[in-house]
Image (cartoon, helix red, strand yellow):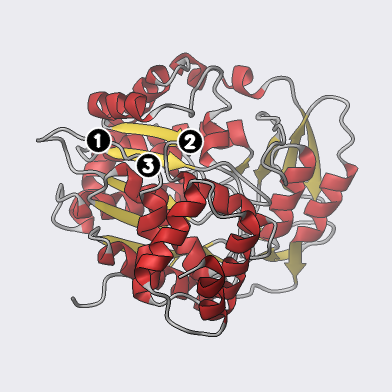
Amino acid sequence: MTPYELIRTKRDGGALPLEALRAFVAAYGRGEIPDYQMAALCMAVWFRGLDPPELRTWTEAMLRSGGMLRRTSGSPPRIDKHSTGGVGDKVSLCLAPLVAACGVAVPMVAGRGLGHTGGTVDKLSAIPGFRTDLSLAETDRIVAELGVCMVGQTDEIAPADRRLYALRDVTATVDSIPLIAASILSKKLAEDLDGLVLDVKVGSGAFMRHREEAERLARTLVDLAWALGRPAVAWLTSMDAPLGSAVGNASELLEAVDVLRGKGPSDVRALTLRLGAEMLVLGRKAGSIAEAERLLEGAIDDGSGLARLRALVRAQGGDPEVLDRPEELLGPLQTTEVRAATEGVLAAVDTLAVGLAEVVLGAGRTRSDETLDPGVGFTVRCRPGERVERGEPLVLVHHRPGRDVAEVCHRLAVAFRIADRAESVPPLFLSRVEARRR
């Protein structure tokens, strides 16, 4: 079947021959299929979707376009976690070393931020010298030594996905659930995992703003992972307010370190413990979520989670001592307060607007080649449901001395809606999606 025939078949709602689809995706990964033909197929998929065998074939072809991490016999179970992204989501930074300290290996391939959402790779890159561009061989070595490694996607890992993601970004096909699922799992399965935990964000600061579409994505991801032989579970969690207090690359890193010290915001700690517990249960290091959370709390209390993060920073080229020197990570900053214009109850936060204000400040990017300022960011002082007084600081803006932040402050001021009375606030944990009976 020619590329033209494949595109026309999907456009017209027909079933794609799996071998022809596999060959098409593989050829695209090798640079033998032009972008305009892949763009046409992606648009057909956006309208028509992919049935389960087609989605599995597409994902496998992207996975096989590159290499995979290796493991030795007798190595610990490998479980990873993926978040669909939000504002202030720094959970991976404390979760990965904490889970590794409990005996489950976490070979995490993470991403950079784009648009209003932050990226784990950007937060780690706030550490001077920290390398996220490791080769597969380097990643294998660090995982074998420490049980954890946190890297960005390279040309060695699912290169077809890397090329396709850039294409989808400019062809209005990013928000296709089958293509999202294939993109996520083609990278994650290159880690040679035994299981995967997924955090699918829902709300004003998430890519999936409505619960129904988030549930559809979570179900697609879980079913696809199981179909590819990897047990998976997903949580739908709220992104109707920034997660934690810190928004910004270095400041979020420092907040994750606080969690490993037994401190930090309650929502970041709760999410870290719940997702980490799911990882330990999938890795058979605990028989229940309650037992797993106790193990994780023990690794916080005895300092082994923080020690593992320090070892990770050193292994990937950074100086772990900077985690104790915030001023070195942040640099010289001034603080401007965004105050409440009236008294009342904080009813809601437009979290997307907060994320876009972060981009304007210089802590986020709209293009993949933009340079970030790792030290600037926000401290969120008020949560939905809390009472505020007129003139009370809602957000602290941390910026470079002399920087005009009037636009940033205006964006933040209108993002926080104050009402006369309290309104319902969604819980952090919305629902759990597990495998259908098999």
Q: Secondary structure at mark 2?
A: loop
Residue 438: quadrant of the picture: bottom left
Callout 2 crowding tier (Cα within 10 Å): few <14, some 14–19, many ≥20:
some
Q: Amino acid at mark 3?
A: Leu
Q: Identify the residue position indicated by label 1 in the image.
A: 70
* Front of the two marks 2 and 3: 2
- In the rendered image, residue 381, in percent from the top left (x then y), is placed at 66, 47
Residues at marks 3 and 1, CA–CA distance in whole angstroms: 22 Å
The residue located at (50%, 64%) in the rendering is: 179
**Quadrant in the rendering for residue 287:** bottom left
Residue 28 position, x and y percent, is 51, 53
Mark earlier in primary sequence (3, 1): 1
Q: Amino acid at mark 2?
A: Thr
Q: Nearer the viewer, residue 413 or 42?
A: 42
Furthest toward the left, the residue is 74
Q: Which mark is residue 249?
A: none
Q: Which mark is residue 95?
A: 3
Q: Is residue 392 left or right of residue 200?
A: right
Up-down relation of residue 149 to residue 16 (above or below): above
Task: Give me the residue at 75% from left, 65% from top.
Answer: 417
**Residue underneath mark 2:** 154
Circle 1 residues within 10 Å: few <14, some 14–19, many ≥20 = some
- Which secondary structure, mark 1? loop
**Which quarter shows the N terminus?**
bottom left
**In this rendering, would 387 be left or right of 315?**
right
Q: Residue at x 74, y 71 (%)?
A: 419
Is residue 270 in view? no
